[in-house]
Amino acid sequence: MTDPLVVGVLYPSEWNFDFDRHLAELAAIDPRIELVVEPYEESRELRSGRGVPPYDAVRQLAPELTAAQRRALARIECCLTLDLPFDVASVAPRLRWVQALAAGVAHLTSAGLREAGIRLTNASGANATSIAEFVFARILGEFKRTRRLEAIQQQRRWHPVFGENLAGSTVGLVGFGPINQEVARRARAFDMDVIVVRRSAAPSDLADEVLGPDGLHDMLSRCEIVVAAVPESPETHELFDRSAFAAMRDGSMFVNVGRGSLVDEPALVAALGSGKLRAAALDVTAVEPLPQDSPLWDTPNIYISAHCSTEPTGFFESTHRVFAENLSRYLAGEALLNEIDLLTETPQA
């Protein structure tokens, strides 16, 4: 490749405290690189709606492209981005490769990448450590009863409240990408048993048992804690419905740090309200921001956070490291890291 490589950086600079340094590092990879910075951002409602087809209901939510955005998209050959316009090839005819800013890519595939022959890579693993730590913060908060301890402190009462041990309990992991692999490592440190449900039932050194998708309800019945970290897809849409929550062990805890579309939220509200589940921790919801009138806010024993389980500085550092490596590989005509098979929307082997 001897012609300039026009690289678009399409996410807002204010998200990344080290934005200028990261841009300088990208430019230094090769003199052929020309960076074009032009943010394109969609609402969380639109992003969530683009995760599962059909997309007609949310197309009207797409922002109108500015003249500057159209000029930038018309020139770029590759980009680092969180969002893309629908029918992106019509406004970015030179686009050949997209590096996703996150691990989830369902909303990007709806831009027509497969149809246009545009390659897609993700940032799988960039936020795995911070999210796994967040998962255990929520689990420990529930099992060690920190909410109750804090309330008693506020009342200036000296009243003992005893928690429960995690050691000897069983955690079930739904999905086994980088996030839940890090959760498994921490579960091992707490002397917990680990059962995994994923597409392939191939064994793992990080798990005591690995089951295929058909083993989901069996696993749910055997675990004190269930942690879900799966991408958004038609197969995972409302996978946790009334039957799934009914299959869970009485008094167990549910944690979701993947995608909000995984959960049938009225079914979760019912499971918590009836006492079937002891608690649930959600960092993601079906609609984000979560509406103020959502029943989830008033559901007992629920922990809600605003999709903030990651740590931004470390996340952008890791993501730009992946993008920089892939830029070098792209220029050299080599295989890209974390490339997605757009026929199946899964990582390529």
Image (spheres, grey):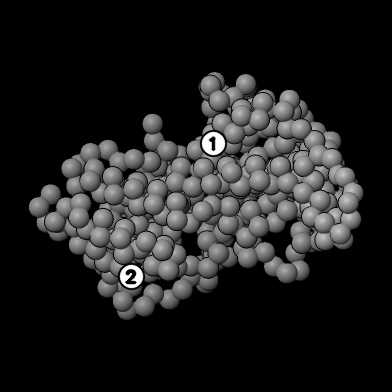
Tell me if residue 215 can be seen. Answer: no
Using a 10 Å C-alpha cutoff, classify the residue at mark 1 as few (fewer than 14 neighbours), some (14 to 19) or many (20 or more).
many
Residue 206 appears anywhere in the view: yes
Residue 326 is left or right of residue 179, and the answer is left
Viewer-closest of 11 and 2: 11
Which residue ends up furthest to the left in the rendered image? 2
User: Which numbered disc covers residue 193?
Assistant: none
In the rendering, at what x and y percent does residue 131 appear?
56, 46
Q: Which x, y percent locates residue 342?
A: 40, 44
Rendered position, 20 above or below 339:
below
Q: Which residue is mark 1?
A: 182
Residue 113 position, x and y percent, is 37, 53
Q: Which mark is residue 38?
A: 2
The crowding category of the residue bearing disc 2, from other C-alpha atoms within 10 Å (few below 14, some 14 to 19, many at least 20), is some
Q: Amino acid at mark 2?
A: Glu
Residue drawn at x 72%, y 36% is 225
User: Which quadrant of the structure image shows residue 91?
Assistant: bottom left
Query: In the rendered structure, which amino acid carries the disc numbered 1?
Result: Glu
Between the C-alphas of marks 2 and 1, the distance is 34 Å
How far from the left and from the top, in percent, is residue 339? 36, 42
The residue at the point 73 percent across, 32 percent down is 166
Q: How many marks?
A: 2
Going by the picture, which residue comes out furthest to the bottom? 67
Q: Nearer the viewer, residue 289 or 145?
A: 145
Q: Earlier in the sequence, mark 2 or mark 1?
A: 2
Element type at marker 2?
loop
Name the residue at 77% across, 42% down.
Answer: 144
Q: Who is closer to the viewer here, 262 or 292?
A: 292
Task: Give the quarter of the figure containing the C terminus.
Answer: top left
